[in-house]
Image: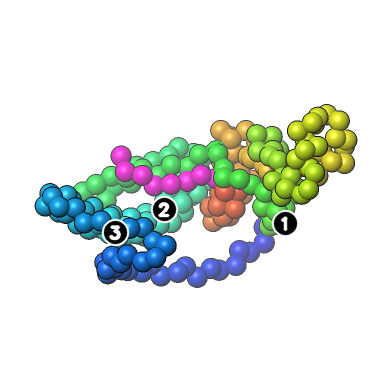
Amino acid sequence: MAKAKKATTKKKFEFVVKPKAEAKSKKGKLELLTPSKKEVLEAVDKVSEMSQTIKSLDGKMSAYKEIVKNWAAETYAERAIKGKYGNFNIEGDSEVVQYIVSGRASEITEEDKENFLDTYGEKFDPMFEVDYSRYRFNAEFLKEEGNLEKFSKALVALGNDFVERLIVPAGYKPTNGREVIPNLAKLAKKADILSNMITDMKLVAFVKSK
């Protein structure tokens, strides 16, 4: 039986546009040059002004997307429990956006998998498979004196112990990505649990304009 999820308090979004800082030339900093052409001076100001505007708009759009995504995630889970697994469009007063959920996931670590199984039960273990594409060399181990030289000479001659320490264990990915939502829905049986599972399994879900 799934454990109750702890309630989380979402941070309030705040938008702060910092005042334009006065350009100064200091020792160790980039040299400050002033163009003689008026069109270049005006273009510099426009680039700076528009950059600030874009930053402000990006922050606001992220906040609006979060509102839409929270509603869409709940709605998606409610539909999936009833056997409707498709993505959908969302209509506002005058515009339409899309909500997309895929069978892909961001990197799932061993800890992520253990937490998921602790929360929802061992019956979900088959939903994970080793992602062999994410094996990578342990850079910190290679930095140790002599290790890189050994590696360069002959990987096959290093021995099991060295290789086991050299390779970082792979992460995990959803088993059979195309069927992951239907399979989760059948076992979850409740929309709120399914919604939490989609988040905890790190499945890619996002809102985008059409």
Q: Which mark is residue 118?
A: 1
**Disc 2: which residue:** 69
Counting residues from the start of the chain, the first of labels 3 and 1 encountered is 3
Q: Which residues are magenta?
A: 203-210
Residue beneath the point at 39% across and 47% down = 207
Chosen colour scheme: rainbow
Please give left or right for residue 87 compared with residue 159 in the image: left
**Disc 3: which residue:** 32
Amino acid under disc 1: Asp
The furthest residue to the left: 38
Amino acid under disc 3: Leu
* SS assignment at label 2: helix
Q: Rate crowding at label 3 as few (under 14), some (14 to 19) or many (20 or more) other CA atoms within 10 Å.
A: few
Residue 83, horizontal then vertical, whole percent = 51, 39
Amino acid under disc 2: Lys
Q: Rate crowding at label 2 as few (under 14), some (14 to 19) or many (20 or more) other CA atoms within 10 Å.
A: many
Q: Is residue 20 above or below residue 136?
A: below
Q: CA distance from mark 2 to mark 3?
A: 44 Å
State the image quarter where residue 60 is shown: bottom left
